[in-house]
Image (spheres, helix red, strand yellow):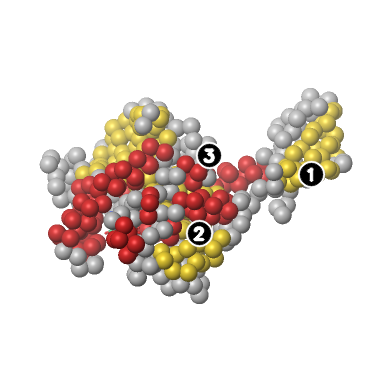
């Protein structure tokens, strides 16, 4: 049972504060403990009347974040940046299945939604469906388990073993402070979507996806160019039907496109990255460049930022995305010297940093991660900081919400 801060006065609004504790009542309501206390208050105007304080025991509830993207689009890299913002290393469950897809740190548990594949590799082959097809996934179980974790109940989550292609015996997942569900379908099922406190979609254009796949699967996994092309082509119809449409529901989208700074570039090394941030999302205020709401184009290269060809261009402004009002921050190009990023950081606002230069510090800490010299790393870091801020706001509001002061 969570401790209810009935005696806390700091969260009360400015016109009401508790002077003398008096009678406390409590009752149970929809699985929440609700405390009522009546006390005398001294108003700013000097009068005296009573306050009613209600308090729900949801204080320890898990905050749930959804991260959607196709395979090989940078989810793991993003997760490493996110968990680093909260401090502590993320590791697979101790003493568990060595092929577990789960990563646990002090504050976060990242579960991979591949674990909700209902068909194993052979099963998908027999039925002629890809892992992206909803028929190969158990959304009922996904919903039940995310809901349970969100309400503080541990679950036995299945494991999809990427080494064997089989469904392994389940692993115990305890409710963390922050649960990240990452994978192909975090926003596909409406019931699961409604459980998310914040959602992100990594939207990697086909050209860039192809370049990254070649880099990883050819260089690191020994696949041939033809097989990589064939695998991308085979997934495309289901990707378009079931994965891509989820971006309309995301609170933040990181869109990765080929550069516009090099005419007809087809190397896919220099990237144009757009951070699309939905307006009006609770506990999330979009980052802005120079002046909130205006349209800005900025070339920061010069005395304070070293840029080699083709340079760097930032843009910022309002837009609409699937009918939603959004703010878009864009970076085209790449940094030569990461330590000079502080110059760019000092022109961005609403970053939710805890100290001046925190974005630059995080980027320098993980300079070896893919994308650290461009907008992918920068925007993933910024979204990580926004998630920390969102978590802190939700936790603070849960501590404060119980205290609803009403004039008698
Ligand atoms: N920002 C980036 N810039 C350049 N390359 C990147 C970037 N992010 C990822 N990559 C490339 O894509 C590969 C896959 O990245 P990562 O493992 O983070 O993706 P993933 O979505 O978790 O993949 P999977 O679901 O297949 O495990 C990396 O090894 C790297 O080659
Ligand atoms: O799209 C994917 C998500 O990561 C995988 O292809 C899916 O999980 C199937 O995995 P495997 O290819 O290891 O059988």
Q: Who's the residue at 35% across and 35% down the image?
A: 328
User: Residue 153, position in %: x, y?
Assistant: 61, 57
Tell me the CA gap for discs 1 and 3.
29 Å
Q: Which-is-in-front pick, marks 2 and 1?
A: 1
Q: Who's the residue at 31% across and 57% down the image?
A: 127
Location of mark 3 (residue): 283
Q: Which mark is residue 217?
A: none
Work out whether 235 lies above or below 100: above
Q: Which mark is residue 27?
A: 1
Q: Which mark is residue 109?
A: 2
Tell me the CA gap for discs 3 and 2.
21 Å
Q: Residues within 10 Å of mark 3 (few under 14, many from 20)?
A: some
Q: Which-is-in-front pick, marks 3 and 2?
A: 2
Q: Residues within 10 Å of mark 1 (few under 14, many from 20)?
A: few
Quarter in which the N terminus is drawn: bottom right
* Residue 138: quarter of image: bottom left
Element class at badge 2: strand
């Amino acid at each position: 049972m969570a401790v209810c801060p009935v005696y806390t006065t700091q969260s009360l609004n400015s016109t009401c504060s508790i002077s003398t504790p008096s009678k406390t009542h409590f009752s149970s309501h929809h699985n929440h403990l609700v405390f009522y206390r009546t006390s005398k208050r001294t108003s700013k105007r000097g009068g005296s009347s009573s306050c009613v304080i209600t308090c729900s025991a949801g204080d320890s509830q898990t905050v749930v974040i959804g991260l959607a993207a196709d395979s090989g689009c940078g989810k793991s890299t993003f997760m490493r940046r996110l968990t680093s913002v909260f401090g502590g290393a993320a590791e697979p469950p101790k003493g568990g299945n060595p092929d577990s897809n789960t990563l646990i740190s002090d504050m976060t548990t990242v579960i991979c939604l591949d674990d909700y594949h209902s068909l194993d590799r052979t099963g998908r082959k027999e039925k002629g469906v890809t892992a992206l097809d909803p028929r190969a996934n158990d959304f009922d179980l996904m919903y039940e388990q995310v809901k349970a974790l969100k309400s503080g109940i541990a679950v036995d989550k299945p494991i999809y073993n990427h080494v064997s292609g089989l469904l392994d015996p389940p692993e115990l997942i305890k409710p963390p402070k922050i649960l990240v569900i990452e994978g192909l379908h975090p926003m596909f099922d409406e019931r699961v979507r409604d459980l998310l406190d914040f959602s992100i979609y990594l939207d990697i254009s086909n050209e860039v996806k192809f370049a990254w796949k070649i880099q990883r699967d050819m260089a690191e996994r020994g696949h041939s160019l033809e097989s990589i092309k064939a695998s991308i082509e085979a997934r495309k119809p289901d990707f378009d039907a079931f994965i891509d449409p989820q971006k309309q529901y995301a609170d933040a989208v990181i869109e990765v496109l080929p550069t516009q700074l090099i005419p007809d570039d087809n190397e896919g090394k220099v990237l144009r990255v757009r951070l699309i941030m939905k307006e009006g999302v609770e506990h999330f205020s979009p980052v802005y460049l120079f002046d909130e709401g205006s349209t800005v184009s900025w070339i920061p290269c010069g005395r304070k930022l070293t840029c080699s060809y083709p340079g760097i261009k930032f843009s910022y402004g309002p837009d609409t995305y699937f009918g939603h009002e959004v703010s878009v921050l864009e970076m085209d190009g790449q940094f030569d010297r990461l330590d000079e990023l502080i110059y760019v950081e000092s022109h961005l606002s609403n970053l939710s940093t805890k100290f001046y230069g925190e974005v630059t510090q995080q980027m320098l800490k993980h300079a070896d991660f893919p994308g650290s010299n461009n907008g992918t790393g920068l925007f993933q870091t910024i979204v990580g900081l926004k998630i920390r801020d969102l978590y802190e706001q939700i936790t603070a509001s849960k501590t404060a919400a119980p205290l609803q002061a009403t004039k008698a």
